[in-house]
Image: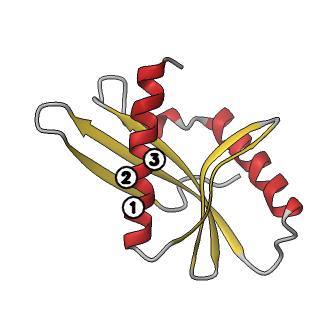
Amino acid sequence: MGRYNKEIGNYGENEAVQYLQDLNYEIIERNFKCKMGEIDIIAKYKETLCFIEVKTRYATNYGFPAEAVDRRKQFKIYKISELYIIKNKISDLNFRFDVIEVLLNSKNNRFSLRLIENAFQI
């Protein structure tokens, strides 16, 4: 991923975190990494642990951002979340997989954001 794409991704993640906090999500961890990959945001909402993938784009020419979370990516997120749950000995929370789409508008420096709860199941 190029530096420019990384900056766009970071901007989208920062906006997503602010949005989640405004909705009373507790941000547990950002960019949880292991050998298998990374989960952008891990947050708690009520009694649910949410593993959240953030996708930021300038346009929908190649589909909506959430469409980039294909079956292979979903399985990878699932395996990383499984490791996180085991590593942190979490047994008292439900969990789900969400996707946040951030669409940027270069004309007026605005963006739209959409939280897709339970975006996929494994």
- Who's the residue at 68% across and 41% down the image? 38
- Who's the residue at 36% across and 23% down the image? 62
Judging depth in this view, the residue of 49 and 34 nearest the camera is: 34
Badge 3 is on which residue?
Answer: 13
Q: On the picture, is 81 further left or further right than 5?
A: right
What sort of colour scheme is used for the picture?
secondary structure
Q: Amino acid at mark 3?
A: Glu
Q: Is residue 107 above or below residue 74?
A: above
Report helix, strand or loop for mark 2. helix
Task: Give whichever of discs 3 and 1 has the lower sequence position.
Answer: 3
CA gap between label 3 and label 1 equals: 9 Å
CA gap between label 1 and label 2 equals: 5 Å
Q: Quadrant of residue 81?
A: bottom right
Which quadrant, please, contains the N terminus? Answer: top right
Badge 1 is on which residue?
Answer: 18
Confirm or deny contact between disc 2 and disc 3 (CB under 8 A).
Answer: yes
Q: Residue furthest left?
A: 108
Q: Residues within 10 Å of mark 1 (few under 14, many from 20)?
A: few
Report helix, strand or loop for mark 1. helix
Q: On the picture, is 22 further left or further right than 68?
A: left
The numbered mark at residue 15 is 2
Q: Amino acid at mark 2?
A: Glu
- Who's the residue at 41% across and 58% down the image? 115
Residue 109 on image: x %, y %: 17, 39
Residue 99 on image: x %, y %: 50, 51
CA gap between label 2 and label 3 equals: 5 Å
